[in-house]
Amino acid sequence: MRPRRFDAKSGCAVGVTLSVIGGMWKPLILFHLFAGKKRFMELSRAIPNATQRILTLQLRELEADGVILRHAYPQIPPKVEYEISAFGQSLGPVLLSLRSWGKQYGGSIEGVSQTPHAPEDRQPNACSL
């Protein structure tokens, strides 16, 4: 395993947590991986607004932090699968809390929005897990 990227010397546990799971795509990647092993293109289809480049970078960071495991199989065509590591399993309650808070917040601002959107205008829901 590669060394972890974050710096725990700052003394701020929230900062350490955010350095590992922060950003727009990492929590979504993790939610999809909690459902089971996924190949790169499965994740790419599940999170259509993330470019392949950014998805690759985020997966590499999560792997470097020990949160996910990458399994490369020596075959043609190449096969790579990602899954949550044993260490990453501890993030389950954190992600469920984030999802719960997001549902509450989304419900509280839905009627307040100044620019109503028709249901067909909405982006696909990437975290329906």
Image (cartoon, rainbow, N blue to C red):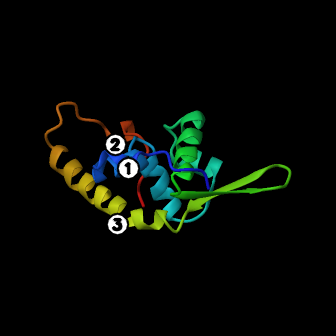
Query: Is 84 placed left or right of 19 in the picture?
Result: right
Depth order, front residue of 55/71: 71
Q: Quadrant of residue 128?
A: bottom left
Q: Quadrant of the N terminus?
A: bottom right
Which residue is labeled 2 in the image? Answer: 119
Q: Which element is circle 1 on?
A: helix
Q: Residues within 10 Å of mark 1 (few under 14, many from 20)?
A: few
Which residue is labeled 3 in the image? Answer: 93
Q: Residues within 10 Å of mark 2 (few under 14, many from 20)?
A: few
Query: Is 49 placed left or right of 42 in the picture?
Result: left
Q: Amino acid at mark 3?
A: Pro
* Residue 95 in view (yes/no): yes
Q: Which element is circle 3 on?
A: helix
Q: Position of residue 72 (x, y in %)?
A: 73, 55
Q: Is residue 69 above or below residue 58?
A: below
Q: Residue furthest top?
A: 115
* Residue 125 in view (yes/no): no
Query: Do callouts 3 and 1 mark residues in contact (Cβ within 8 Å)?
Result: no
Q: Position of residue 13 (x, y in %)?
A: 30, 53
Q: Position of residue 20 (x, y in %)?
A: 42, 49
Which residue is painted at 52% across and 68% down in the image? 86
Depth order, front residue of 43/59: 59
Which residue is labeled 1 in the image? Answer: 8
Give the CA distance from mark 2 to mark 1.
43 Å
Which residue is painted at 31% across and 38% down in the image? 118
Q: Amino acid at mark 1?
A: Ala
Q: Which element is circle 2 on?
A: helix
